[in-house]
Image: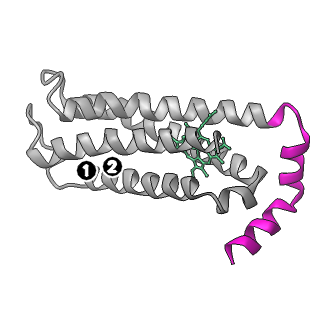
Amino acid sequence: MLQTLAAALQATELSQTLRASIWLYPLVNTGHVVGIALLFGAIVPLDLRLLGCWNGVPLDALARTLIPTAIAGLVLAVATGALLFATQPLDYVGEPLFGIKMALLGAALINALMLRLSPQWGEPRPLSPPAWRIAGIVSVLLWLGVITAGRLIGYR
Ligand code: HEM
């Protein structure tokens, strides 16, 4: 089923254009890296704040600028990631590391959503509750896992 869908995607004009052009793939890849930089660069200071760094800075003030930056990075990384995938979908559906990367990405997004939707999120508090500290550590580890898996795919 997945193979059939991947074969159909690989036969599209978009996929053929991405493979044929010498500058399109590197350009899309650059967009992917910029998206990752924005996402991870915004997530890490937030996670460190949850872990106890910069307790004098209100979490709400940090979140107001860093969450939109992280979302913009995520949207760019997902859009360009879909194009990178569309270049060689038959290779990627058969690659376990790609599946691992998508599973880690899903887990990182669920962790971030659960944290943001927790009822105490809006309350001003200098120290994070223990559950938020755990979520901060888990977040850094999961995003590092996504980046490592993404990078490793290129060496397979
Ligand atoms: C649905 C979302 C995404 C898709 C479909 C996707 C897909 C891909 C694909 C197909 C590649 C090329 C692998 C190769 O052959 O070398 C790639 C590279 C990569 N991805 Fe993603 N990706 C997504 C989101 C992300 C996110 C959110 C991150 C990190 C936070 C990420 C990190 C990376 C890294 C580090 C590379 C290697 C870049 C390089 O070596 O130039 N990806 N991705």
Check residue 90 for magenta coloring.
no
Quarter of the C terminus within the rendering: top right
User: Is 89 displayed left or right of 13 in the figure?
Assistant: left
Query: Label 1 sits on what residue type?
Result: Leu
User: In which image quadrant can residue 133 be found?
Assistant: top left
In the displayed structure, 53 sits above or below 122; it is above
In the displayed structure, 106 sits above or below 154; it is below
The residue sitting at 17% across, 24% down in the picture is 53
Label of residue 115 in the image: 1
Question: Which residue is denoted by mark 2 in the rendering?
Answer: 112
Viewer-proximal residue among 125 and 95: 95
User: Is 20 displayed left or right of 105 in the figure?
Assistant: right
For label 1, count other residues whose C-alpha is less than 10 Å away and answer few (under 14), some (14-19) or many (20+). some
Segment colored magenta: 1-24
User: Is 60 displayed left or right of 93 in the figure?
Assistant: left
User: Is 24 displayed left or right of 28 in the figure?
Assistant: right
Check residue 5 for magenta coloring.
yes
Majority SS type along the magenta span: helix
The residue sitting at 62% across, 36% down in the picture is 32
